[in-house]
Image (cartoon, grey):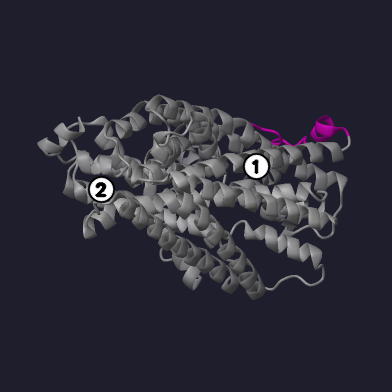
Amino acid sequence: MSDYGLDLAIIGAYFAVIVWIGVYCSRRNRSVADFALGGRSIPWWAVLASILASEISAGTFFGSPGEGFRLRNYTYAQLMLGYLLARLVVSAVFIPAYYKHNVVSIYEFLEIRFGPRTRRMASAIFLLTRSLASGSRLWVPTLLLVVIWNQTHRGEPLGNWEQFWFTGAALVLISLLTAAYTAVGGIKAVIWTDVLQIAVLFAALGFSVWYLLGHIPGGWAGAKSHLTGPNDLRLWQWEGEVAAATPWGKLKSVLETEFTVWAALFGSLFVTLATHGTDQDMVQRMLTAKNQRQSAVATILSGLADIPVTFAVLTIGILLAVYYGHVVADPYLPMAAGQPDSTRIFPYFVVDVMPGGLRGLVVAGVLATTMGSLGTAMNSLATSYSRDFHFRWFGTPNDDAQRVRIIKLSTVGFTLVLILVGLATAFVKACHPSLSIIGIILGSFGYTYGSLLGIFMVGLFTRHRGSEAGNLMAMTAGIVAVAILSNLPNDLTQMISGHPLYDNPAWFPIIEFPWRIMAGTVVTAAVALCFTSQGENCRRAG
């Protein structure tokens, strides 16, 4: 069997196993609770694996090694501080509230606390943001397919439109396959395939580190001998990238720098509170645990498990910088703006260097992260839409089987939405290959999730503040504030017309992504706290 034949056999075996899992899990979905929450019967260690699988998307699989390659240090790992602190808060405050009120869609809590309009707006923000973020991520793993094609057809690389049709067909196939086991097996199928996917991912990362260390003379000690720059192997960064003399200048520089200790303590704290406390996609996994204690254990341990995973992917990137910078001179290395392309460096290494079988394992790992994140997105979007909108508009069927059928049909519907978003992303890149639209769309949750977190925090930490009308104004204010602080209007107009919409004053900070959710949360909560809750809602939520 040829090397590529072995790769295809491994990938085919992986597909066969996940389809079997979906069919097997479908036999026990008799109610909405079974389909959406697994009957709250999933063991904590499976919930832990599912949380990890959802956090490690294909963008992370490629992007984090790219950060290690570009920076040659571990400053990205600082964000783990806030991730751990946030999980403690989510486990102590958010999860107990959701279990107490026995919610399926977490936005049901907002109706209990405030009223139906707050619930519907929060759910709508989630549906829109998750559709954009998950749909656009479908484009990312197709980078690997393009690298494989260009590597096997050197001298005949795909053009922009050829890449569009090639990657478009691939993302449609991946989406339909994921929808098949998600719609049939529900959240159980998603979680148990996540367990398989995280095992494949860990194996792929472990093999990558092992292989690189084995092919760099002297192993890790030999690699360190080439990492002697002032920022190489650095872990902590206290100050911003731009030196400043005034206190405001220093604060502005910190807000405009991605990875600092302050971003780790405060920015990533709010990011994780939002993604793990107010996102149906993530929280729905947590609510499948047998009780809130097991859910909390899985949530906290997932934060601890993130630490070695993050260091592993960054180490891969750092080792790649040494491998291609000092060990191998490769004239075919993917380039961008005259420099090695950090985004494509890991997929290039996988295709060009790794032996058959191992290469197939890594490709399966990429498919694992993509399908794991996509599967939960489909299930959570369908659950949130059905519970928060469809049953309210068209009535809740008395028959449990009919309710499950509606959620399954909604899963198929959102699959089509995600495919359209993925195709639109590929289309825009084909028309304008130099545009940085991917970063804007992939970071879309940063623009909106602060408004969700702000309202949830007012609901959870106060008893008499916040109202229906006030919450709608607060969430709108939070989204607008983050859009302005992150320069989104200028980015969009620059992308469309090539010219900015307005000029920002020199003192105005353009905040980086770790700070966006914090800014949105502060603005949203500040506005919502100006209004008083109705007494009945306070009693029901208490």
Q: Which residue is mark 2?
A: 119
Q: Which of the two discs, 2 and 1, sits closer to the camera?
A: 1
Residue 78 got which mark?
none
Image coordinates for residue 177, horizontal then vertical, percent: 56, 58
Residue at 18% from the left image edge and 40% from the top image edge: 530
- Relative placement, left or right, of 237 versus 534 is right
Corner quadrant of residue 97: top left
SS majority, magenta = loop
Give coordinates of residue 339: x percent, y percent. Answer: 73, 56
Q: Amino acid at mark 1?
A: Leu
Residue sitting at x 68%, y 46%: 70
In the picture provided, is 54 more to the left or to the right than 540?
right
**SS type, badge 2:** helix
Q: Residue at x 57, y 74 (%)?
A: 431
Q: Which residue is mark 1?
A: 201
**Vertically, is 374 above or below 91?**
below
Please tell me how many numbered marks the rendered image carries.
2
Is residue 231 highlighted in magenta?
A: yes
- Kindly give the residue lying farthest to the right in the view shown: 217
Left or right: 432 with respect to 540? right
Magenta span:
218-235
Q: Is residue 419 visible?
A: yes
Q: Which quadrant holds the C terminus?
A: top left
